Amino acid sequence: GENVEQHPSTLSVQEGDSAVIKCTYSDSASNYFPWYKQELGKGPQLIIDIRSNVGEKKDQRIAVTLNKTAKHFSLHITETQPEDSAVYFCAGGYQKVTFGIGTKLQVIP
Amino acid sequence: GEEVAQTPKHLVRGEGQKAKLYCAPIKGHSYVFWYQQVLKNEFKFLISFQNENVFDETGMPKERFSAKCLPNSPCSLEIQATKLEDSAVYFCASSHLADGYEQYFGPGTRLTVT
């Protein structure tokens, strides 16, 4: 089955700086890679996703890149704000997704 | 509705008791997924449905876990004879797309087994 590895496990940035979270996957059949933001006590919120026929996707301050050859994908958040503080999960798969272990992002005002 | 609804929010059961969790997918979504999140943030896939049909149950502990999605009823996840290690937050997600795309999650049910 699919194995998704995510790093770092924690990340602290100053408000206004950029944050980057990286993930790798093992199954070359995986074709869908969503990113979720989970705030304390809430369910994961889908913030952006990318399919394997695309190398990059951007939505305002959030962007995701995918390198199929190397089997890795990354989340980039620019101009971070305190409300970006949360746990971020990458996931990948085909017909079902496997989650990474999460990155706790802290944006320091 | 426009959001995935899960009930109850919290559930406490003594070891050996039955637990039943409910999920109402977003209206119009044909696909439902159940996940278990344990304390270390790890998400474990349990089962998925396409309408009332089981699509993938490879993550289900078969001895004590069962799930259903019946027409015109909330989906349910039932755990017979709960064990301490079943303590977790159980999330339901739904999608209108096949292949696991665009899953939208509910707020979860926190199950505590004492």
Image: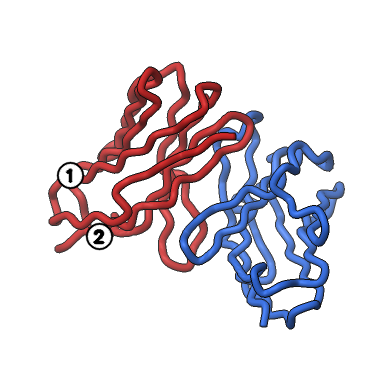
Chain B: colour as depicted: blue
Q: Which mark is residue B29?
A: none
* Location of residue B5 (image quadrant): bottom right
* Image vertical order of residue A104 relative to residue A64, above or below: below
In the image, taking residue B76 as reference, residue A75 lies left or right, namely left
* Image vertical order of residue B30 relative to residue A39, above or below: above
Chain letter, red: A
In the image, taking residue A47 as reference, residue B50 lies left or right, namely right
Q: What x and y, as percent, mark residue A75?
A: 31, 38
Element marked by disc 2: strand
Which part of the image, by quadrant, shows the C terminus of chain B?
Answer: bottom right
Mark 1: amino acid: Ser
Q: What x and y, as percent, mark residue A96?
A: 61, 36
* Image vertical order of residue A42 relative to residue B104, above or below: below
**Which residue shows up at 38% across the image and 51% down it?**
A88
**Which residue shows up at 32% across the image and 28% down it?**
A65
Which colour assignment does the render follow? by chain
| Earlier-in-chain disc, 1 versus 2 | 1
Q: What x and y, as percent, mark residue B59?
A: 69, 47
Element marked by disc 1: loop
**Which residue shows up at 45% across the image and 46% down it?**
A100
Q: Are marks 1 and 2 on the same chain?
A: yes
Q: Circle 1 is placed at which residue position?
A: A18
Q: Circle 2 is placed at which residue position?
A: A106
Q: What x and y, as percent, mark residue B53?
A: 83, 39
Pick the front one: B82 or B50: B82
Return the chain for callout 1: A
**Which residue shows up at 22% across the image and 45% down it?**
A19
Mark 2: amino acid: Gln
Return the chain for callout 2: A
- Count residues near mark 1 (Cα–Cα under 10 Å), then give few for <14, some for 14-19, many for 20+: some
In the image, taking residue B44 as reference, residue A18 lies left or right, namely left
